[in-house]
Amino acid sequence: MEINIPYYEDNTRISNSSLGWFKISPKYFYEKLKGNIKDEEIAAFKKGSMIHMYLLQEDEFWNNYVILDYEIPKSKEQRLFCELYSNSIELDHNLRLSKAFLGAYTIKSMSENKILSEALKLYNKYTDYIKYLNIQDKIVISWNDLAQLKTIKQNILNHKKAKTLLFNDSPDCETHNEFHINWVFRILTDTNTNTTIDCKSLIDRFIIDHKNKVIKLIDIKTTVSTATFNTDSFWKYEYGRQLAFYWLAIEWYFNEELKLDFTIYKKETYILAIQNNGLFTIKVFRIATEILNDYKQEITELLTDINWHKLNNLWEHNRAYYEGDGSELITNDTKRTN
């Protein structure tokens, strides 16, 4: 399996997320893949990413995050002093302090010693903020963030099923965390010929027990409420389609990379739901096979339509518009379910 482009940078392949874009509209899908529509950074997503990395890639976590509690300067002069000090290439610490102070404040009459003294006070007060300004490649978190992460991990260890899925790795099992698979999906075209679509998946975790012939797929979700996750979030965000898409990726991985018979393995699918507030409650949901089979059918239909739009280079409307009279029929099957 060749991976030359990082997962989130590769717009040449179809992901589960891009299937969601296509369901909004072919035009939205097209513009997203072209990079003309940018993702919004939502606090919940950033927190979810932090939790994922802490649980699944703890060594990698500390390469990407740093704990820093800092006091933010209260005036524009204080902020400018910190920025000037941070950006300075002056090697002499005292001279660097004085120059930053003189650049930030209008000085009428003050001795050099007094300037240095005042600058040193500001530096000592805002040292952590200055450190923050110097951090270019890490995300700053607080001690409270770390305490929450530790609580989540402990709650998982206290949950009899979550613990076995996330931390009880057996030496007899093949385990993958944050596993990137570039794979190929084959569809049958209207001309009865096979065509392929390049796809990609970044799977939270899956475990292959070769001895007992079992594959366990585990996806971590953060949610505002574990109590209503199975009746609300699961369906609203179509997590079943995401998991079905992952199974197609794993099947390809088995057949093409491992050269093993995928059909003889039992498949188990789990979502580990973490409440991202309050008591950080943990729940594990096992996903029924029939739900995944329904979504696999939907994936096939979506990829078939995407292939049609690519072949015809038509993106303004959906396929039914081009093949029909331009109207769309509303039936009981199209009513909102969430």
Image (cartoon, rainbow, N blue to C red):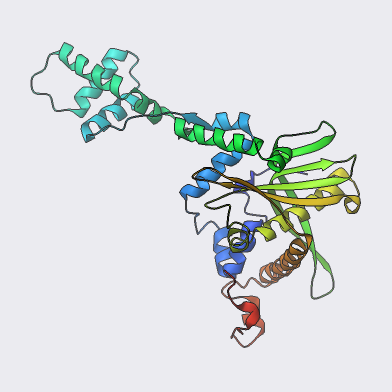
Quadrant where the N terminus sits is top right
Q: Position of residue 248 (x, y in %)?
A: 77, 56
> Which image quarter: residue 68?
top left
The number of numbered badges drawn on the structure is: 0
Q: Measuring 73% from the left and 58% from the top, which residue is drawn there?
A: 244
Q: Nearer the viewer, residue 89 or 188?
A: 188
- In the image, farthest residue toward the bottom: 325
- Report the side of 41 relative to 1 (left or right): left
Q: Quadrant of the C terminus?
A: bottom right
Measuring from the top left, give residue 70's x and y in whole percent. Answer: 36, 29
Q: Which residue shows up at 47% across the image and 51% down it? A: 42
Toward the left, the furthest residue is 109
Residue 16 % position (x, y): 66, 57
Give the vertical position of 113 relative to 170 (above or below): above
Q: Is 44 displayed left or right of 286 in the figure?
A: left
**Horizontal side, residue 292 vs residue 230: left or right:** right
Image vertical order of residue 159 relative to residue 188, above or below: above
Camera sees residue 73: yes
Residue closest to the eye, 183 or 297: 297
Residue 142 visible to an observer of this rendering: no
* Residue located 52% across and 48% down the image: 45
The part of the image, by quadrant, that contains residue 209 is: top right
Q: Determine whether 168 is above or below 125 in the image.
A: below
- Specify whether 128 is left or right of 206: left
Query: Residue 117 or 287: which is nearer the viewer?
Result: 287
x then y, percent, for residue 19? 64, 62
